[in-house]
Amino acid sequence: MASITVHGLIGRQVVSIAEGERLGVVKDVLFDPTARTVVAFALGGESGESILAFGKVRRIGPDAVMVDQKADLQSGPTEGAKRFSEVEKLPAISVDGVNLGSVADAEFDSERSFLLTVDVRSGGVLGIGQQKAVYSIDKVKSFGTSAVTLDPGATAAGGSE
């Protein structure tokens, strides 16, 4: 299984195989908060924002996201999807009412689109002394508009930085 973080994907160029054309760069990742899957990428380009459905991605390479053709892009929003930028920096709160920190990143399966983990950061000043905890996606109860909630038995899958 190949995986990538949202921040590892942001800024990556998207290239059409058929036209050999750069279509834009990934600006945001859209996900289905119920199914816990990545559904699309928001791209920034010369003609404004466009949406690339995850199903149209041929391959996520180390330097570029490859699609078959330029026509694979769409212009409208993806119904029911939430942008990662909407949950980034939200407080991560346990259902016991403990503030665990704030959402910093997420990791997903780059071949099958499943969200795998959510990174939560706490403490520190300007990143110095900051603690990082990685929670399995099954520990997330909800991706709300004001907070991301984690179940009370949520134990971190990772350590600190």
Image (cartoon, helix red, strand yellow):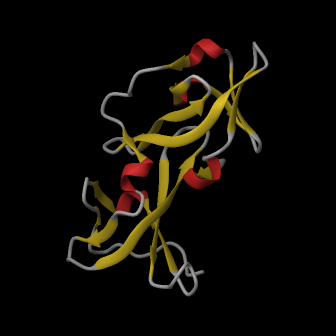
| Residue 15, quarter of the rendered image | top right
Residue 8 lies, with reference to residue 80, above or below; the image says: below
Left or right for 99, reference 85: left
Residue drawn at x 32%, y 68% as measured from the top left:
91
Residue drawn at x 46%, y 20% as measured from the top left:
75
Left or right for 34, reference 68: left
Residue 131 lies, with reference to residue 14, above or below; the image says: below
* Nearest to the observer: residue 160 or residue 12: 12
Return the x and y of residue 20 as percentages of the image width and height. 79, 19
* Nearest to the observer: residue 79 or residue 109: 79
Residue 160 lies, with reference to residue 40, above or below; the image says: below
Return the x and y of residue 11 as percentages of the image width and height. 65, 45
Left or right for 3, reference 16: left
Classify the position of the C terminus by image quarter: bottom right
Left or right for 138, reference 131: left
Return the x and y of residue 95 as percentages of the image width and height. 21, 71
Return the x and y of residue 96 as percentages of the image width and height. 20, 77
Residue that sits furthest to the left in the current view: 96
Total labels drawn: 0
| Residue 59, quarter of the rendered image | top right
